Image: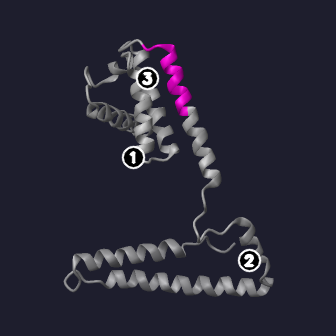
Amino acid sequence: MVLGVIASHLCCATDRFLGWVRSQPGAVGALDCSLFGAEAAQDLVERFVQWCQHERQLSMGTIGTYLNSILSCINFAHASRICECEDSFLQAVCNLRMQAEAQSREDRKWKRPHPAWISWGECSLLHSSFPLCEKMLTVAAFTEEAQETRRAALQRQDDADADKFTYEERVELAEDVLIVCFHTVAPPDR
């Protein structure tokens, strides 16, 4: 299963690259792994990265993932003797991937968190502001009320008759029940 997912991902990333190559003016030759043995392969990969970054405005993490998949296909083509790849080409693609991953890490450092994000420090400060007993009662009251809401939502879904509700209404009700269940699932008290 896992190998199938990995192979599928590698194929998809390679298909994206080969599809982009096909769209380029003057694209000649076979659109398969033998392309990586061509003289212009390094230039094509570099231009693909620039296109992903500037035209498609993909994140550097996504570009790094694409490059990792392309690098895996290049290694496969080289090991399978489908094409002979220059070591400098392999090194250039590795360098591009490392640069993309480094830029992705740097971008994450400066990315603004979601407005609703609460850090661990803020959580501990919030929890420490409640006296212990009041906090326990508040959590217990919330938990019981949440569980009642969940049970009522599940009962409403069970009572929903296919003759009285349209398909869209049943889907909306199912989505509501799913959201309530996700927000109210809690481990049992120990």
**Residue marked by disc 2:** 126
Element carrying mark 1: loop
Say whether residue 133 is left or right of residue 54: right
Residue appearing at x 21%, y 86% in the figure: 164
Expressed as whole percent of the image width and height from the top left, the position of residue 157 reads 35, 81
Expressed as whole percent of the image width and height from the top left, the position of residue 34 reads 33, 18
Residue appearing at x 45%, y 27% in the figure: 72
Say whether residue 126 is left or right of residue 84: right
Which residues lie in the magenta part? 85-97
**Residue marked by disc 1:** 56
Say whether residue 181 is left or right of residue 139: left
The kind of residue tagged 2 is Leu
**Residue marked by disc 3:** 42
Element carrying mark 3: helix
Question: Crowding at label 1, few (<14), some or many (≥20) Cα neighbours within 10 Å?
Answer: few
Are discs 1 and 3 less than 8 Å apart at CB?
no
Q: Mark number for residue 125?
A: none
Q: Main secondary structure of the magenta part?
A: helix
Instruction: Out of 118 and 127, give the one closest to the viewer.
Output: 118
Mark 1 or 3, nearer chain start:
3
Question: Which of pointers 2 and 1 indicates the residue nearer the eye?
Answer: 1
